[in-house]
Image: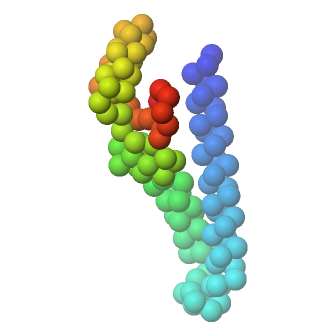
Amino acid sequence: MEKHMNLLLLIFSFITNWIVSASFWALYFLFTAPFFHEELAGNYELLTERILQLSLACVLVPAVLSGTGVMQYFFVRENGGRRAAGETKMYLERLMRDICRRGRLELSDFRLYTAKADDYNA
């Protein structure tokens, strides 16, 4: 049941983000088409197609990029985190091995980061 709820939440989030993005692009073209996009002024079919393409790109590109290691690194770094190293890394890996064993997961599927603090955190 939980997987179905997660899927429904993902679909709802996608549709909501797409509607917000489409609204933004529609307002943008509504006010700029007569001045900067003469080819779109009055051509509602082309305008609608352009809005749909840009809205889809604005939702899908960040979704795809957010799963990459580079983006994860920037998100963590921006929030004051860093890769676990030294004694902290060994401690966290020991904990993660136990968690992965219990959950039948692979440790290599995870990246360990810590916040800039003196106590243990991950």
Q: Is residue 89 above or below residue 46?
A: above
17 and 80: which one is in front? 80
Residue 88 image offset from top left, x and y in percent: 36, 27
Q: Residue at x 34, y 15 (%)?
A: 94
113 and 75: which one is in front? 113
Q: Is residue 9 above or below residue 31?
A: above
Q: Residue furthest front?
A: 118
Picture quarter containing residue 8?
top right
Q: How is the image coloured?
A: rainbow
Residue 62 visible, this orientation: yes
Q: Is residue 106 left or right of residue 39?
A: left
Q: Residue at x 58, y 83 (%)?
A: 40
Picture quarter containing residue 83?
top left
How many labels were placed on the picture?
Answer: 0
Q: Residue furthest top?
A: 102
Q: Quadrant of the N terminus?
A: top right
Q: Residue at x 68, y 58 (%)?
A: 20
Q: Is residue 109 above or below residue 63?
A: above
83 and 29: which one is in front? 83
Q: Is residue 100 above or below residue 76?
A: above
Q: Is residue 5 left or right of residue 121?
A: right
Picture quarter containing residue 101?
top left
Q: Is residue 119 left or right of residue 24?
A: left
Residue 110 image offset from top left, x and y in percent: 36, 28
Residue 75 visible, this orientation: no
Residue 70 image offset from top left, x and y in percent: 35, 49
Residue 91 image offset from top left, x and y in percent: 36, 20
47 and 1: which one is in front? 1
